[in-house]
Amino acid sequence: MTIPPKGHLLDLGSWDGSTLKHFLELRPDLKIYAVDIQKHPNLTQVQYTFHQADLETDTLPWPDNSMDAITCMHLIEHLKNPSKLLAEVARLLKPGACAYFEMPRPKTLTLDSIHGDNVGTFTMNFFDDPTHVNFVSTGRLAAWLTQRGLKIIDSGISRNILIALAYPLTMFLGKNRRRFTAKAHWHGWSAYLIAKKTA
């Protein structure tokens, strides 16, 4: 997904701003816009334009065809009805611009939950997170986006291969967040989909 110099990037479901900080480290030239249902205190550490909104019901304040890229990572599974969100993505993207979505894979529906003292500290099974209310596969999301005039250009498993390959080594570290993260990447916990606005 290519974003032009000094492009406008909208991140939907920004939470604590950690992803935005990473974006700005890689591309300090970008103008960042962030949306979340609540303003997290850590968001004040990131240079951005923040808008508080309920992405199931609210229209966002930016004009049509105003964004060079949109990211939506681990948000859609928290929405009972993503129709408004997807309509806003289609409205806000410039022609030729792309949206990147990331969400849990079907595999997460059958993975074992974390057990013992660590139960509830890490989402391994999809239902470990009580705010997950709607499982959305890449196929289902692709159909919704296609209905809104976007073209699917890529999809697959989102994983950091270096973290995944570290998983066998973490067996000796005991049960901690580093081990759980490595296990999630080993299994390929997340899927991604990229859609392009063609006109």
Image (cartoon, rainbow, N blue to C red):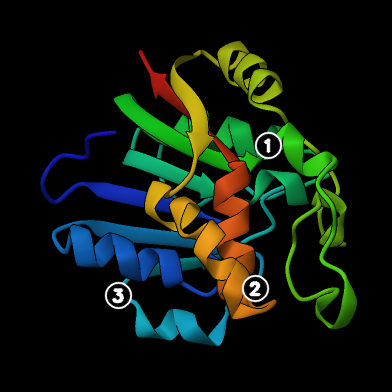
In the displayed structure image, the side of residue 152 where residue 75 appears, left or right: right
Q: Residue at x 55, y 50 (%)?
A: 185
Give the mark, 2 or 1, whose residue is nearer the N terminus: 2
Picture coordinates of residue 179 (x, y %)? Answer: 60, 69
- Secondary structure found at label 1: loop
Picture coordinates of residue 100 (x, y %)? Answer: 45, 37
Pointer 2 local density, CA inside 10 Å: few below 14, some 14–19, many at least 20: some
Picture coordinates of residue 119 (x, y %)? Answer: 85, 74
Disc 3 to disc 2: CB gap under 8 Å: no
Give the mark, 1 or 3, whose residue is nearer the N terminus: 3
Residue 91 against residue 29 in the figure, above or below: above
Judging by the rendered image, the residue that carries numbered circle 3 is: 47
Judging by the rendered image, the residue that carries numbered circle 2 is: 38
Q: Residue at x 59, y 74 (%)?
A: 172
- Secondary structure found at label 3: loop
Number of marks in picture: 3
Amino acid type of disc 1?
Arg
Picture coordinates of residue 17 (x, y %)? Answer: 46, 72
Give the mark, 3 or 2, whose residue is nearer the N terminus: 2
Badge nearest the viewer, 2 or 1: 1
Judging by the rendered image, the residue that carries numbered circle 1 is: 105
Disc 1 to disc 3: CB gap under 8 Å: no
Amino acid type of disc 2?
Gln
Q: Nearer the viewer, residue 1 or 107?
A: 107
In the displayed structure image, the side of residue 197 where residue 106 appears, left or right: right
